[in-house]
Amino acid sequence: MKKLILASSSPWRKIILEKACIPFEVQVPDYEEDMTLRLSPPQLAVTLALGKARSVAIRHTNAVIVGADTFAVYKKELIGKPHTKTNATRILKMLSGKWHDVYTGLAVVDAKSGKFLSKTVHTRVHFRKLTSSEIRAYVESGEPLKAAGSYTSQNTGATFIDRIEGEFWSVTGLPIATLVPLLARFGIKR
């Protein structure tokens, strides 16, 4: 059976993929995400995921590589990782009490043949109304600085979410219910 490789530096994607009970290894992709590409959110999510997967696939001859990319969208503004406390605060205030969209692109690449399958998973997320002190404390914790949309749905940021429409694991960065059937088409099964 071919080796399965997760092309990601995200510890959360690793934890999620472990839930599928399929042996895999992790390799960090050598790919620069470009959020400025003039593509629709679903197309951009898949393009970035495919770039990550292909950057790892070129290192192998007999492996199946999974790439993923997640970002949020609010009123046509793409929201990736904020990187700064100021930007995280702005984003959390903007999303407070409102719906936003989360897009996760998946790409599965066969390193030997170059064949791939890709899919974008769209999930809607609603935040309850956040207080200024909640936002300040959360930003000071550092948790949102490296998270798409300025929050993590698997830690403290989960307390901000009061409704989700779609696949929960997509919001955390790896929609496992969508990924497992894609892997099966490449012969990767439990």
Image (cartoon, rainbow, N blue to C red):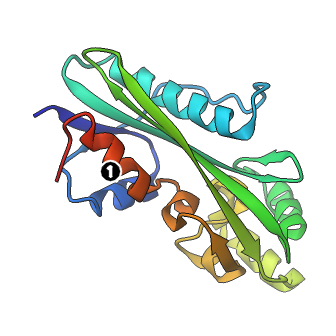
Q: Amino acid at mark 1?
A: Val
The answer to which image quadrant residue 8 occupies is: top left
Please tell me whether residue 57 is drawn above or below residue 93 in the rendered image.
above
Image point (59%, 28%), residue name: 47
Foreground of the two, 5 or 88: 5
Q: Secondary structure at mark 1?
A: helix
Image point (88%, 69%), residue name: 93
- Picture coordinates of residue 148 (x, y %)? 66, 53
Note whether residue 79 is visible: yes
Note whether residue 26 is visible: no
Badge 1: how crowded within 10 Å, few (<14), some, or many (20+)?
some
- Picture coordinates of residue 188 (x, y %)? 20, 41
Q: Is residue 150 left or right of residue 109?
A: right
Please tell me whether residue 75 is drawn above or below residue 41 in the rendered image.
below
Please tell me whether residue 19 is drawn above or below residue 84 in the rendered image.
below
Q: Which residue is mark 1?
A: 180
Image point (27%, 59%), residue name: 20
Foreground of the two, 149 or 146: 149
Image point (50%, 28%), residue name: 50
- Picture coordinates of residue 16 (x, y %)? 38, 60
- Picture coordinates of residue 139 (x, y %)? 75, 69
